[in-house]
Amino acid sequence: MRVVFLEEVEGTARTGDVKNVADGFARNFLLPRKLAAPATDHYINIAQAKAGKEERRQEKVDEEARDRVLPKVDGKAVEIEVRVGEQGKLFGSVTARDIAEALQAVTRVELEHRQVDLKEPIRELGGHEVTIKVTRNVLATVTVNVVPVGGLPAEEAAEESPEVAIESEAEAEVSAASEELIEEEILEQEPPAEAGDAGEESADEELEKELENDSVET
C-alpha cells in the first residue's frame, strides 16, 4: 500500500515521506494510529505542510541546543567505576543508561539513555569516545573513562606499565651515580664529571476526523 507519513516513525520514515509499505503494516499499525494515510493528493498536501512546520520547529530546537546545551556536553569526560576480575575483565558492562546518568551528574543537563549512541555496552577498561545526540541534528562527543573500583591491583598495575619500573630503575642508577660524584668532590675538592640524563617521557482535529471517516469507510 502506498501511504504518506503524517508523523515520524523512527527507522521507517519522516513526516511527509511517501512510501510503499506492506498492507498489514499499514492497516494494522500505521492507519489506526494516524501515523500515515493513503497517499492521495489531499493527504500528501496536508503531510507536506505539517513537515514544513516541523522543520521550522526543529531548526529552533537545534539552534537552542547549540547555544545552551552543546557547550556543556561536548568534549566532557566522565569516569565510571566498575568491578573487575582477573586480567581486568569487567563483571557486567557499562550501558547507555550508565553513561547518561554519569553525564547528568557532571553537566547538570537532563539526558535520556536513548540519546547515547552506543552500539553495544562497553566491556573493557580505558577511555572510550561516545556520541551523544543532543538533538536529531546536534551531536556531541564525550569520553567515558571506565576504571576499576578502588584502582588496579598492584600486580596488574605493574603488568600494565612495565616501562614505569624501568624508568624508576634508571632514575635510581642516576641517583647513585650522583651520590658518588658528590663524595668524590668532597674528598678530592674537584668538580664532578657531568652525568647524562636517563628515561623518556611519554511533532489537527480536522485531519483526525478525515482519517476516522476514511477508516470507517474502509
Image (tube, rainbow, N blue to C red):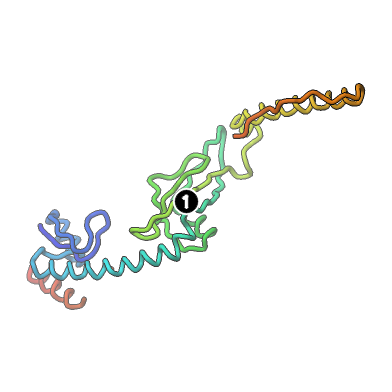
Please say whether residue 114 is visible from this viewpoint: no
Q: In x, y percent, where is residue 52?
A: 22, 68
Q: Is residue 213 above or below residue 63?
A: below
Q: Is residue 179 above or below residue 119?
A: above
In the shown orientation, is residue 131 left or right of residue 8? Answer: right
Q: In x, y percent, where is residue 117?
A: 39, 51
Q: In x, y percent, where is residue 32?
A: 18, 66
Towards the viewer: 183 or 136: 183
Q: Residue at x 43, y 45 (%)?
A: 121
Q: Where, by quadrant of the figure, is residue 160 drawn?
A: top right
Q: In x, y percent, where is residue 54?
A: 26, 68
Please say whether residue 75 is visible from this viewpoint: yes
Q: Is residue 127 above or below residue 58?
A: above
Q: Is residue 173 above or below residue 17?
A: above
User: Dot 1: few (<14), some (14–19), or many (≥20) neighbours within 10 Å?
Assistant: many
In the shown orientation, is residue 160 left or right of residue 196? Answer: left
Towards the viewer: 115 or 54: 54
Q: Residue at x 13, y 54 (%)?
A: 22
Q: Residue at x 91, y 26 (%)?
A: 186
Specify the amino acid type for callout 1. Answer: Val
In the shown orientation, is residue 72 left or right of residue 38? Answer: right
| Secondary structure state at the residue bearing disc 1 | strand
- Quadrant containing the C terminus is bottom left
Residue wearing tag 1 = 142
- Quadrant containing the N terminus is bottom left
Q: Where, by quadrant of the figure, is residue 28 drawn?
A: bottom left
In the shown orientation, is residue 187 left or right of residue 6? Answer: right
